[in-house]
Image (cartoon, coloured by chain):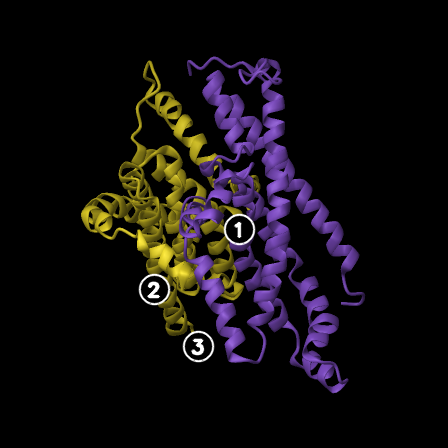
Chain colours: A yellow, B purple
Amino acid sequence: MGLGLAMFSNFDFSVILNSWRYLFFDGMAFTLTLTALAAIGGVVLGTLIAMMRLSGLPVLPQVAKAYVNFMRSLPLVLVIFWFYFLVPYIGQWIIGSERPIQVGAFSSSLITFTLFEAAYFSEIMRAGIQSIPKGQSAAASALGLTYWQSMGSIILPQAFRNMLPVLLTQTIVLFQDTSLVYVLSITDFLGAASKIAQRDGRLVEMYVFAAIVYFAICFIASLLVRRLQRRVAIIR
Amino acid sequence: MNYNWNWGIFFEASPEGNGTYADMLLSGLMWTIVTALCAWVIAFAVGSVIGVLRTLPGRGAQMVGNAYVELFRNIPLLVQMFLWYFVLPEVLPESWGTWLKQLPNAPFYTAVVCLGFFTASRVAEQVRAGIQALPRGQRMAGTALGLTTAQTYRYVLLPNAYRIILPPLTSEFLNNLKNTSVALTIGLLELTARARAMQEFSFQVFEAFTAATVIYIIINLIVVTVAGVIERRVAVPGR
């Protein structure tokens, strides 16, 4: 009880009431936009990487495998720094301009998370594609469908459906990981909370509040994913 | 690309005055490894207990285990780092808080405890999965032989479960190792932090990050190789 009192005797709720618009409309909006776009980009790119890896063509599978293993052996924080400094130079090289181009914090982190998460999404999609019996792609080519037709209308739709819960769980992980853009002083949800915390000297309130918000969102999202998992399971 | 490459930078003295940039990165590597190993000790011990709780017949034990896993999995690691580092000393009784704040190497101890408890929730998931993957008959056979529940876990279930989950535990260990880099936010001078500092001092961005990247890849390869050896050593013969 003494601990509880010590904890809340100085707890100043007004700092949250005064800053919630900034926290949610600036911070959380950034976090959610980044999560959504990086998840879409990551799934598309990840699916292409998985297709490369399973293609049976020369070189491509090795390239895909090397990319996935490379990304998965690096800490996300290091990758965030890498792209933050590398993207301006790549942009310069593509456009052919004189100096490294200025890339905003948002584009830089979107590129980072898309490329990084693609490695993880590709492993999920690889399992998804492999979960479809081989007979189906054989049947598709027997019917005269091309590779892209059979992938697009037969294999991938089923692979997505089978893997949807896992893809969404990975997206929750991605949502949590976006908090690491803090290292670039970006105003995502945690960045916003941290700025208020330092401005007003209210670290306890802001970090506890941030933890509660993250927990509530991730907990509810994972409950929903579990319900979905039961609903979409194909009865065989 | 108008970038001035200078690979000799690693052998130049760092402005910290106690060696070259290469020494700086190596001391970062040392902190990364020590933090990862210490955190793993906590993660493995706590994770095993929580994992076992979730497989016990009692509902209370299961609820405690589930609550632990949900709590630690649904808050980003970085936020947990801040809770341990900035919030905990403030909410403890004042004398304890002051002691914590004055602790030498506070970022290191905080990182170890935070990563340990965070990774424990993941280890717990694996331990539970490993125990549940065993045939029901093993637990029953243990009971039939007159073993207590504790003895059944100690001599029958856990030795088998750990062997099954060795591959996912290896990947959790690697995650744990990579996650030490999150502790740079609370001032732990681990490998990524040192590469970042080298970039700030010398402006040789790409050399610094390339070196860190290569080091991380080498550690990964070493861990995977060692895990492979352990896996073969402890494999149950005939399975």
Q: Residues within 10 Å of mark 3 (few under 14, many from 20)?
A: few
Give the Cα distance between marks 3 and 1.
26 Å
Q: CA distance from mark 1 to mark 2?
A: 35 Å
Q: CA distance from mark 2 to mark 3?
A: 26 Å
Kindly check if marks 1 and 2 are in contact, taking CB atoms under 8 A apart as contact.
no
For marks 2 and 3 on the same chain, the one whose residue lies earlier in the sequence: 2
Other-residue count near label 1 (Cα within 10 Å), few / some / many at <14 / 14–19 / ≥20: some
- Residue A55 appears anywhere in the view: no
Residue bearing mark 2? A220
| Residue A110, placed above or below residue B228 | above
Instruction: Return the chain for callout 1.
Output: A
- What is the secondary structure assignment of the residue under circle 3? loop
* Residue plotted at (67% across, 67% down): B161
Numbered label attached to residue B1: none
Side of B134 relative to A158 (left or right): right
Q: Which residue is mark 3?
A: A235
Q: Tell me if residue B96 comes above or below residue A234 in the rendering.
A: above
State the residue at coordinates (68%, 41%).
Answer: B222
- Quickly name the residue at label 1: A54
Q: Nearer the viewer, mark 1 or mark 2?
A: 2
**Quick one: label 1 or label 2, which is nearer the N terminus?**
1
Task: Please state, as top left, top right, bottom left or bottom right, where the N terminus of chain A lies in the image.
Answer: bottom left
Q: Position of residue A142 (x, y in %)?
A: 47, 62
Amino acid type at circle 2 is Ile
**Residue occupying image coordinates x 64% and y 38%:** B219
Question: Which of marks 1 and 3 precedes in the sequence?
Answer: 1
